[in-house]
Amino acid sequence: MEAAAAKRPEIISDKDQMRRWSRAMRSQGKTIALIPTMGYLHEGHLSLVREAHKHANLTVVSIYVNPGQFSPSEDLSTYPSDFEGDIHKLMSVPGGVDAVFHPHNLYDYRVDGKNEIGKSGGDEECKNQEGGKGGVVSCVEEKGMGHETWVRVERLEKGLCGKSRPVFFRGVATIVTKLFNIVEPDVAVFGKKDYQQWRIIQRMVRDLDFSIRIVGSDVMRDNDGLAMSSRNVHLSAEAREKALSINRSLLKAQSSAQEGHKSCTMLRDCVVQAITEAGGKVDYAEIVDQESLEAVEEIKNPVVFCVAAWFGKVRLIDNIEINA
Amino acid sequence: MEAAAAKRPEIISDKDQMRRWSRAMRSQGKTIALIPTMGYLHEGHLSLVREAHKHANLTVVSIYVNPGQFSPSEDLSTYPSDFEGDIHKLMSVPGGVDAVFHPHNLYDYRVDGKNEIGKSGGDEECKNQEGGKGGVVSCVEEKGMGHETWVRVERLEKGLCGKSRPVFFRGVATIVTKLFNIVEPDVAVFGKKDYQQWRIIQRMVRDLDFSIRIVGSDVMRDNDGLAMSSRNVHLSAEAREKALSINRSLLKAQSSAQEGHKSCTMLRDCVVQAITEAGGKVDYAEIVDQESLEAVEEIKNPVVFCVAAWFGKVRLIDNIEINA
């Protein structure tokens, strides 16, 4: 039997109202944990809520599909959403959450149809611009929103998912900075399923002197072992069965390493072979240092084995830590 | 007769102590204005202190020569400093300042000789790395401090001073972000002598949702008209006399525009000629929109005429707003 439903969270869509809420709570001596999400919540997100309860008095979940981390060719428009369903899921967690921040557009700075600062940065001006250094263009530049400030964690953003998604971590670091400045939390909780993202945010917080503690929360899996993801809904039953090859082969690699097989080439080959044989297309399969995310040849220190693979039109990521 | 000396400010060098100070003050209902400086203060900085008094209960001046905004070939090591003199100058302003934040190194995250987050980012690791996109390398990368997160205002940073100093505004935006996160001010005051910097910080604050009001303060000049700058100390009497050509020619351009001469080519030619004839070497002389900083052909809307020129080994900047 499910626990009694928790309180309905306060739903806040205005950023100034969100900040006032946080400041009012802090002035009462409360600490605040933020969980940034893009909605379409699943048990993985709910585990972050339970984690947040351990670290702060109040929990804020943000639900915002961030155009800044999608390139124009990616799946922004088809990213799934179910706001009312999300609220009910959050209410199913004992203790629930205190506020949900659900803004409409965090990159539109116009006030009453006009831009807040003078006339530059309007709808027309940025269209077809070439974007930042290296030709990086997200859906924010494409839509000509006038936003032009980006946070980059220049070394950590380059490897793993950064190779095939050059705008992704620039967009993540920037939206998280914005959310930190709006919500002003004491703690923020990130899932370690997005391992590179977690390390990037940790590094950004250090480098930019945010007074926020970053908590990493373990990967949540369905009973069959598939790492939970909002994108799993796009998998057919058949594709899902094939996708189990990721976790299974990673578990085998972890066992092999613990039994003394420390050569990363061998371990990687086994995982790539297993996923490929199952019908997946490997984007990357890398064994990297847990901190620097730099590839290693032989496992001597704690590493994480990170994989991204396509099953049909769905790109999945997963990872496993190997503390050899 | 000079006013009686104001109180000696509290000198804080530790960033956690600085944040505790700000939070303690805010919990007493005080508002805080921050003035970021690189020290070697002059009357221009003191005018920012007087401006700050209008906007907040308490004033914090940061004094920190930021290696992140100098390229290895620039004058970081010869940048002048006089900390005790600075404190006395600040005390000469009626009302004075409440705290001076004077950190040692804001890019060194090691704790007890070790890096705070794991082993990456140490002294050795980053040396000779190629730095960010576009080969941009500041003294921070050169010294291998392990810092790798940078804030860029991608469009506004490109023109004017950004052309000859590609690391400059990336470094400014990043250190100001760090100072904002450490001091947590309500207001920050910037001099409009650094016009592009002021506009960049204004845009960054909007784009990253900082809850900080940015105040621009007018250019301060010596009696002879030279815009005040810490670099003026390097000018010989003769070079200083020549450098007056900047302000004089800008004033003439302003008059011409007000008399109906709206062609920017003509106005620019006059200024370049005057400075060159005086013995200066013009880096740029541009008439740009006050908001977008984009060059204009003809003055129709409020513009700012920005100049950078070398006199010997000293690079000076100045500007004048033309509200046609």
Image (cartoon, coloured by chain):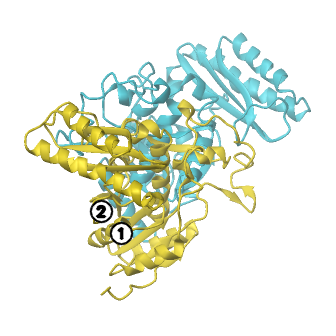
Chain colours: A cyan, B yellow
Quarter of the N terminus of chain B within the rendering: bottom left
Which residue is labeled 1 in the image? B43
N-term-proximal mark, 1 vs 2: 1
Q: Using a 10 Å C-alpha cutoff, classify the residue at mark 1 as few (fewer than 14 neighbours), some (14 to 19) or many (20 or more).
A: some
Left or right for A204, reference B243:
right
The kind of residue tagged 1 is: Glu
Give the answer, above or below, for where A93 lies relative to B212: above
Tell me residue A306's x, y (percent). Answer: 69, 30
Residue at image point 56% right, 67% down: B16
Secondary element at tag 2: loop
Give the answer, above or below, for where B319 lies relative to A68: below
- On the question of residue B207 being in view, the answer is no
Residue at image point 13% right, 43% down: B256
- On the question of residue A214 being in view, the answer is yes
Q: Nearer the viewer, residue A144 or B29?
A: A144
Tell me residue B60's x, y (percent). Answer: 42, 70
How many numbered circles does the render carry?
2
Give the label on residue B311, or none.
Answer: none
Chain under numbered label 1: B
| Disc 1 + disc 2, Cβ < 8 Å | yes
Residue at image point 26% right, 71% down: B54
Chain under numbered label 2: B
The kind of residue tagged 2 is: Met
Tell me residue B232's x, y (percent). Answer: 42, 59
Which residue is labeled 2 in the image? B220
